[in-house]
Image (cartoon, rainbow, N blue to C red):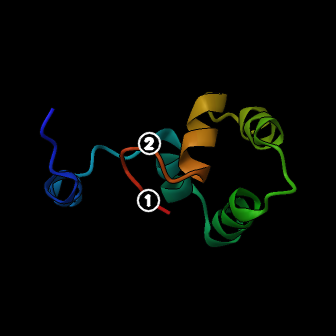
Amino acid sequence: MNRNLGAQLQEMSRRRKGPPCSISVILAALDKDDRTALVEALTDATIEHTAIRRVLADNGFRVNINTVQRHRRRECLCDAQ
């Protein structure tokens, strides 16, 4: 198996980003204060993913726990953080 790690890593950096994830869409819809609060919650490791999802759901936003996790880890397609 002949693999060129450097070429593969370069290719990754050229890939286009995908559509915004649900968290990014929610952030865009919020007013400044709520957006700031959500960004702070997303970056606070002491706040559980489930707590963020619950607060968003209680406020009418449909979001999957996996989406919250991926966005926090910067693994979603939008990489909006």
Nearest to the observer: residue 72 or residue 41: 72
Instruction: Say which quarter of the image contains residue 53.
Output: top right
Nearest to the observer: residue 42 or residue 2: 2
Could you tell me which secondary element the residue under label 2 belongs to?
Answer: loop
Residue bearing the label numbered 1: 80
Q: Residue at x 56, y 35 (%)?
A: 67
Q: Residue at x 41, y 55 (%)?
A: 79
Q: Residue at x 26, y 51 (%)?
A: 17
Q: Is residue 27 visible?
A: yes
Q: Are marks 2 and 1 in contact (CB under 8 Å)?
A: yes
User: Which disc is residue 21 wearing?
Assistant: 2
Nearest to the observer: residue 67 or residue 56: 67
Where is residue 58 drawn, in percent x and y? Answer: 79, 34
Tag 2: amino acid: Cys
Where is residue 44 drawn, in percent x and y? Answer: 78, 62
Mark 2 → mark 1, Cα distance in angstroms: 8 Å
Could you tell me which secondary element the residue under label 1 belongs to?
Answer: loop
Residue 33 placement, left or right of 30? right
Question: Where 33 sits versus 4, above or below?
Answer: below
Q: Residues within 10 Å of mark 1 (few under 14, many from 20)?
A: some
Where is residue 80 drawn, in percent x and y? Answer: 44, 59
